[in-house]
Amino acid sequence: MSCEDDVVVIERSWAEPARFAEIYDRHAAHIQRYLARRVGAQAAEDALNETFLAAFGKRHRYDRARPDARPWLYGIATRVVGQHRRDEVREYRLRASLAPAEEVDGPADRVAAKVSAQATSAAVATGLTSLADGDRDVLLLIAWEGLSYEEVAAALAIPVGTVRSRLNRARRKVRAALGSEVRPLEELSNHG
C-alpha cells in the first residue's frame, strides 16, 4: 500500500479506477465499525458496500483540500444510514420496550447490576429515538467514532457551530431520558 495522502490516491483513481481500492483498504474497518453500531452487524456489510460504491461514484468531486478521506467517507456512510433510519429507530424502540430479564441464579449484586445496565440501555435507546436525525448523527459520530467537531462538520457538510449546537441539544435530551445516569455523557463535553 502506498504512503500517499488519500487525496493523491483518489486523484490517481480517476485514470486508474483500481487505485480506489487503497482508500477502501485504509478506511473500511473504521467505516464498517461505525455502520455496525448504527445499523447492526448484518446490515453493516451492505451499508459498507453502498458507502464505498457511492464514494467511488463521487470521487471526481472529492474536496482536494482534504488530505484525509475518512471524514468524507463518514459523511457518505451517515447518508447511507439515513436510508436505514426507519429500521434503526424501530430497533431503538424495541430495545426501550424490552423489560429487564430476570436472572434467577447468581449473587444479588450481579442481578442488580444487570438490571441497572438494562434499564440504562433502555433509557439510552429511548433518548436516541427522541433525537432529530441530525442531532443523532452528530452525537454518534463523536461518541462512537471519536471524531472531532471539525471532522463531524466535514463529514456532514455542516458548520462547526452547528455540530456544537446539535451535540448540546442531543446531550440534553439523552440526559433527560437517563435521569441521574449521565456520567458517560459528561465525557463528551471534553471532546472536540
Image (tube, helix red, strand yellow):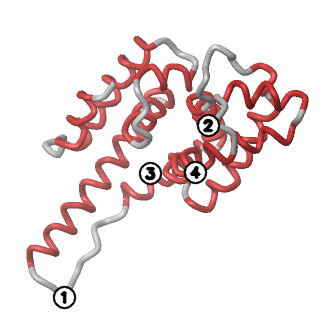
* Pointer 1 with pointer 4, Cβ within 8 A: no
Residue 77 horizontal/vertical position (percent)? 62, 38
Judge depth for marks 3 and 2 and give the one in front. Answer: 2
Judge depth for marks 4 and 3 and give the one in front. Answer: 4
Question: Residue at 72% across / 21% down in the picture?
Answer: 62
Give the residue pinned by disc 3.
92
Residue neighbourhood size for the residue with mark 1, other residues' Cα within 10 Å, grouped as few (<14), some (14–19), many (≥20): few
Question: Residue at 86% across / 27% down in the picture?
Answer: 14
Residue furthest to the front: 3
Q: Circle 1 sits in a helix, a strand or a loop, which is it?
A: loop
N-terminal of the pair, mark 3 or mark 1, is 3
Q: Circle 2 sits in a helix, a strand or a loop, which is it?
A: helix
Q: Circle 4 sits in a helix, a strand or a loop, which is it?
A: helix
Q: Which mark is residue 105?
A: 1
N-terminal of the pair, mark 1 or mark 4, is 4
Residue neighbourhood size for the residue with mark 4, other residues' Cα within 10 Å, grouped as few (<14), some (14–19), many (≥20): few
Residue type pointed to by label 2? Gly
Give the residue pinned by disc 4.
29
Q: Which mark is residue 82?
A: 2
> With respect to residue 98, does 24 lie above or below?
above
Residue neighbourhood size for the residue with mark 2, other residues' Cα within 10 Å, grouped as few (<14), some (14–19), many (≥20): some
Residue neighbourhood size for the residue with mark 3, other residues' Cα within 10 Å, grouped as few (<14), some (14–19), many (≥20): many
Q: Which mark is residue 150?
A: none
86 left or right, relative to 172? right
Separation of marks 3 and 1 at Cα, in angstroms: 28 Å
177 left or right, relative to 138? left
